[in-house]
Amino acid sequence: MEEIYFAGGCLWGVQEFMRHLPGVASTQAGRANGTSDTTTATYDGYAECVRTQFDPKQVSVEELMDFFFEIIDPYSVNRQGDDVGEKYRTGVYSLHSEHLLKVTNYLRAREDADRIAIEVLPLSNYVKSDDEHQDRLTVRPNDYCHIPQDILHKYKAR
């Protein structure tokens, strides 16, 4: 298994979407690359994200990016849907430089590359979200989500 972290607005919807994708073994809601002490509840500078463990024999980083683009506005800065603020920025993080290179190459190859506002950075720190945020939309499917329901349910049946 390999691991990559996706930030695409509120982590509830991102986790619900990612957990059903082919080749994804597990997901965990969390926060990445913040500046505050992880023992406080402020999470200054952190991006809400989903730790995604995947089998590279079943799904590639590039395919995961294709899926990611189904649920984000790649041109928006610090905003996805009605969620606004630095913690809702879009980003892809990893401890593996080859993942970051693949993501960077993927973005550069797009016709709209000059408009994309997705940060691609090494994972500097990660904090698991509280249990109440784990699999939130599985437990409470009617909670708020910026991702349209038809997209959230697209891969569930597979």
Image (cartoon, grey):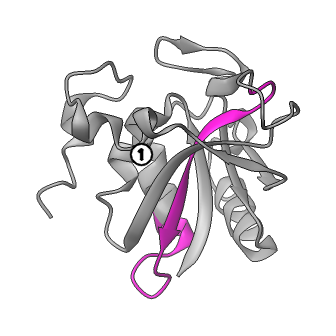
Q: How many marks can you see?
A: 1
Q: Residue furthest front?
A: 39
Image position of 88 with respect to 27: above or below: above
The residue drawn where x is 28% and y is 28% is 148
Residue 98's quadrant in the figure?
A: bottom right
Q: Position of residue 35 (x, y in %)?
A: 88, 33
The residue carrying mark 1 is 15
Q: Is residue 151 visible?
A: no
Viewer-nearest residue: 73 or 32:
32
Query: Could you say whether the residue bearing mark 1 is in a helix, strand or loop?
Result: helix
Residue 72 among those drawn in magenta: no
Q: Which residues are magenta?
A: 43-63
Q: Is residue 69 visible?
A: yes
The residue drawn where x is 86% and y is 34% is 37
The residue drawn where x is 66% and y is 59% is 109
Q: Position of residue 45 (x, y in %)?
A: 80, 28
Mark 1 nearby-residue class (10 Å; few <14, some 14–19, many ≥20):
many
User: Is 129 on the left or on the right of 100, as rendered?
Assistant: left
Q: Position of residue 152 (x, y in %)?
A: 26, 40
User: Is 55 on the left or on the right of 87, as rendered?
Assistant: left
Image position of 43 with respect to 81: above or below: below
Residue 4's quadrant in the figure?
A: bottom right
Q: Residue furthest bottom?
A: 57
* Quarter the C terminus occupies: bottom left
Viewer-nearest residue: 34 or 110:
34
Specify the amino acid type for callout 1.
Answer: Gln
Residue 54 among those drawn in magenta: yes
Q: Position of residue 27 (x, y in %)?
A: 45, 57
Viewer-nearest residue: 114 or 61:
61
The residue drawn where x is 29% and y is 58% is 20
Image position of 72 with respect to 65: above or below: above
